Amino acid sequence: DARVTQTPRHKVTEMGQEVTMRCQPILGHNTVFWYRQTMMQGLELLAYFRNRAPLDDSGMPKDRFSAEMPDATLATLKIQPSEPRDSAVYFCASGLVQGAQYSNQPQHFGDGTRLSIL
Amino acid sequence: AQRVTQPEKLLSVFKGAPVELKCNYSYSGSPELFWYVQYSRQRLQLLLRHISRESIKGFTADLNKGETSFHLKKPFAQEEDSAMYYCAPYSGNTPLVFGKGTRLSVIA
């Protein structure tokens, strides 16, 4: 059963430190998404990529967040410097988009990274 | 603008009672509609999609294009149905747009 893999599962660090979260999408999926989940805001889209190219990162605070896909098997989300308000669960999801003539495939989610900034 | 509204943040029902989780959407074009479920501290999982017209874990959802609604229903709630439920339209050209979610609590 193919799965999206996220590491680390949990991260606790002090304010000001750099945080890097990693995601391995399902093999063959061409679209990767980063979401942030908080009690107050629910699920917010931070950024997404198609065929490794960033399509939209307007949901991401540009001054401290960055998202990249160094290769098709790895997506990263970095926060530098981290702040207490960044504490949340960060989910990665992947999907396959094949074109208008195909039924849209649902996104598959990873287990998330639970981030706590002290 | 794409928007999804799940009017209830919390819905509590007794075991065996019927459940309806509401979802209204505002979306250009003809999106597919999905329901995702998130059990406590777990990943989001696809529950069902409107094009498959199937029943998963006793849940069904009918797309009403006139009312732009995609409400999730189950005739008899079970304790294991307690979870967060998210409605999401999807066009393939844009990411899933999630509603705020509804927390379903089934009371024994």
Image (cartoon, rainbow, N blue to C red):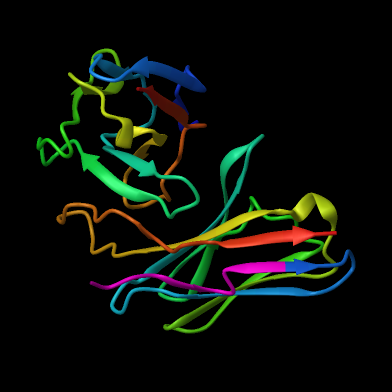
Task: Please identify the quarter of the rendering in which residue A20 is found.
Answer: bottom right
Q: Is residue A78 visible?
A: yes
Q: Is residue B53 magenta?
A: no
Furthest residue in direction right, as rendered: A16
Chain part drawn in magenta:
A1-11
Q: Is residue B24 visible?
A: no
Residue A81 to residue B86: above or below: below
Q: In the rendered picture of this protein, how many numbered marks are placed on residues? A: 0
Q: Please indicate whether residue B9 sits to the left or right of residue A89 in the image.
A: left
Q: Is residue A5 magenta?
A: yes
Residue positioned 26% across, 34% down in the render: B30
Residue positioned 57% across, 69% down in the render: A9
Q: Please indicate whether residue A77 sits to the left or right of residue A62 in the image.
A: left
Furthest residue in direction front, as rendered: B108
Residue B9 to residue A91: above or below: above
Give B15 or B97, whichever is nearer the viewer: B15
Question: x, y percentage for residue A22?
Answer: 56, 76
Question: x, y percentage for residue A84?
Answer: 83, 54
Task: Please identify the quarter of the rendering in which residue A61 is found.
Answer: bottom right
Q: Quadrant of the N terminus of chain A?
A: bottom left
Q: Quadrant of the C terminus of chain A?
A: bottom right
Residue A29 to residue B2: above or below: below
Q: Please indicate whether residue B95 sits to the left or right of residue A66 in the image.
A: left
Give A21 or B28, whichever is nearer the viewer: A21
Q: Please indicate whether residue A25 sits to the left or right of residue A100 in the image.
A: right
Question: x, y percentage for residue A107?
Answer: 34, 56
Residue positioned 14% across, 39% down in the render: B51
Question: x, y percentage for residue B90?
Answer: 33, 43
Give B27 or B71, whichever is nearer the viewer: B71
